[in-house]
Image: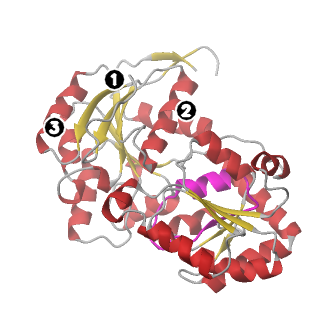
Amino acid sequence: MDGEHVVPSVLFLASFPPRECGIATFTKDVVNSFDHAYGSSSHIIAVDEPGGEFRRYPARVIGRFSQNDRHTYERIANVIASQPADILNVQHEFGLFGGERGEWIIDVIRKCGKPVVVTMHTILPDPDEQMLRVTRDLCEAAHAVVSLSQTGRQLLIDVYGVDPEMIHVIHHGVPNVPFMPTGPAKATFGIGQRTVISTFGLINRGKGLEYAIEAMQPVVERHPEALYLILGQTHPVVRRQEGESYRESLVARIDALGLRHNVKLVDKYLDDEELLAYLAATDIYLTPYLNPVQIVSGTLAYAVGCGKAIVSTPYLYARELLANRRGFLCDFRDAESISTSLLALLDDPALRRSVERRAYRFGRQMTWPNVAREYERVFASVLPPGEPAMAASA
């Protein structure tokens, strides 16, 4: 882009690292990509979960409030109003905020005195009465709404009655990585040329990992070199509630099926560099998730962006991203269906390569630089006419 480009300055409100949750990681990536693209230095308002009040944030976090403390919402609205930023972007997940269905954040949006863009990470196709009301109120309070999928946009229109003109689709961002063979990455992990299947992300019972483990038994019979890596820590909320009981049940299942040589749990919270390294070594990415109405998955987006052959249960986001032969869909809670899809790709390397190429081509629109440009367009669209904005070199 030539010359000086005037872009809005943005204040982001969400969870933020070092908090370990998907929205925190996503927000960090959005902020970093936006600032890199436009030479800006954005600030963050962080929401703390119970027990997270003593977390130490980086200097760019200029305010924080407690999820379940109603009074801190009033204070943070005043903090936002006092900031020089042109726009507030709320990265929204219902579980991040207090009140019925997280409704307390709506007052912050109404009282902060700035145009607000809300990015919706959960949009339910069959909401109960309270969820319907809160979602409608949230969208009405905002100046623009971002959905991370076309499916989510259509739900907002058809189910929630949101004005189509205010809804923008911006895909979940992915790193801009080259399309490469897996051999060099496998060598760095010391796994030779074993065929690698992987799943990553914070672990909880909704991931359906027990079905994926069971599916490995017929896979290993035909491909004894296959290695399934389950990468990630137990979700912090799950760990507080039930400890490591789910992970322990997975380990017991692996032992019972005689799969210790072929299924490994890597109990570690992966940063972006580690995550990309494991994906580079992956031949097939697997998401056996159990929630059919899941509207977005950062792990699936990353796998598409890296050009992986993918097998997934048909939750809403997977059906959209893996359409047009960009991946394989298998049945929910069905180990046999999972193994059938895995074997179709393992038995036919040419098929696997064609699926990889289709996924990679689709993923180019989802790279973080493209996502930053899309966010900038939405932010600029909600500025009042004649409103001054920050100048940044693009």
Instruction: Nearest to the eye among marks 2 and 3: give it.
Output: 3
- The numbered dot on residue 33 is 2
| Residue 343 in view of the camera | yes
Q: What residue is pinned by disc 1?
A: 85
Q: Is residue 92 left or right of residue 78?
A: right
**Which sits earlier in the primary sequence, circle 1 or circle 2?**
2
What number of labels is visible?
Answer: 3
Mark 3: secondary structure? helix
Does the magenta run of residues contain 286?
A: yes
- The magenta segment: 282-307
Q: Residue at x 13, y 44 (%)?
A: 70
Q: Residue at x 40, y 49 (%)?
A: 165
Most foreground residue, 126 or 220? 220
User: Looking at the image, do the residues carrying marks 2 and 3 touch, with CB atoms under 8 Å apart?
Assistant: no
Picture quarter with the N terminus: top right
Q: Position of residue 206 (x, y in %)?
A: 45, 70
Instruction: Nearest to the eye among marks 1 and 2: give it.
Output: 2
Instruction: Indicate the amino acid at tag 1.
Output: Ala
Q: Residue at x 69, y 77 (%)?
A: 216
Mark 1: secondary structure? loop
Q: Is residue 167 left or right of residue 259?
A: left
Question: Does 247 sit above or below residue 138?
Answer: below
Most foreground residue, 375 or 158? 375
The CA distance from mark 1 to mark 2 is 18 Å
- The numbered dot on residue 72 is 3
Please identify the quarter of the rendering in which residue 58 is found: top left
The CA distance from mark 2 to mark 3 is 29 Å
Question: Does 393 sit above or below residue 192?
Answer: above
